[in-house]
Image: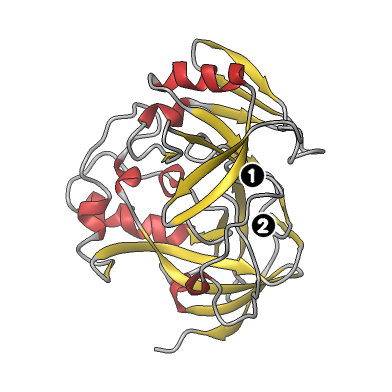
Amino acid sequence: MSVAPQVAALTIYPLKSATGIEVNALELDAWGAVGDRRWLLIDAHGAAITARDAHALLTIVPQIADSDRDGALTLTAPGRSGVVVSVPDADAPVVPVHIWDDAVVARAASPEASAWCADILGQPCTLVRVSRETQRPLAPRFAGPLPFADRHVAFTDGAPLLVLGLASIAALNDRLLAQGETRLMDRRRFRANVWLDHLAPHEEDTWRAVRIGDVRLGVGTRCARCVLTTVDPDTLERGAEPLRTMATYRREGGGVVFGVNTTHADQGWVRVGDVVTVEAARDP
């Protein structure tokens, strides 16, 4: 008797491109997972700074209170004293932000918090947070078949939630082993929110709509992967894998894909152990 797919783990990334936090439950609000990618570092021109270029971002460890994931943030880094970052108030500066193709505004954190981050990155930057002024529309391609009119997202790459089956990572590692690679990929490289167990490799690719617990998710595009997957989160060294191997069997639209972008239909909760029910399959 087969075992139903279920949620194996959940992760949020309070500061985009910094270390993730493992949680037992995700609360989903109008933007996405509460506490997920609500904070961002920008350069002097307002452009988003990510670990694709600034690898040191991966060394920053956010901490939040489970009881108030939209509240104050504490940032730490190896060998450094931490900094407490309060949510910017109504008097905080409103600054322009450019993230991918979107131009929005956000509220700046304290100068002390930005200076702390700049010291870690070794470059000037400003720490900002989404606010009521941040109006970043959800791109339709991420919504899947469910109705998502007038939805907005925070500082995710696009979709509110990234979903990935652990079997997909295991299958990739099998290929790496067969090629004589000794360094295998752990799931931190793929920065998903929802990690699923009891699936066949890339079974998540076949879905159009699913229910996880009491939440319905529309499955939009497969997630195009970038050079961040090639950066070791512990050593910050960059290599050719896993993109080189994924390009041999996961190529799509000029890039490689791994995991799926999803959008929740309603606010609610997703919890570790929740069963996944497929409501609609993707056309072959």
Residue at 48% of width from left, 73% of height from top? 141
Q: CA distance from mark 1 to mark 2?
A: 10 Å
Residue occupying the far bottom of the picture: 283
Is label 1 or label 2 in front? 1
Percent of width and height locating residue 170:
39, 56
Residue at 29% of width from left, 43% of height from top? 230
210 up-or-down from 164: above or below: below
Q: Amino acid at mark 2?
A: Trp
122 up-or-down from 125: above or below: above
Q: Which mark is residue 31?
A: 2
Q: Mark 1 — residue?
A: 130
Q: Residues within 10 Å of mark 2 (few under 14, many from 20)?
A: many
Helix, strand or loop status at disc 1: loop
Q: Amino acid at mark 1?
A: Val
Helix, strand or loop status at disc 2: loop
229 up-or-down from 273: above or below: above
Quarter containing the C terminus = bottom left
Q: Residues within 10 Å of mark 1 (few under 14, many from 20)?
A: many
Which residue is at the front of the view, 106 or 76? 106
Percent of width and height locating residue 153:
60, 57
Is 134 on the left or on the right of 223, as rendered? right
Quarter containing the N terminus = bottom right
142 up-or-down from 160: above or below: below
Percent of width and height locating residue 187:
45, 47
Q: Which mark is residue 106?
A: none
Q: Dots 1 and 2: beta carbons under 8 Å?
A: yes
Which of pointers 1 and 2 lies earlier in the amino acid sequence?
2
Which residue is at the front of the view, 123 or 160? 123
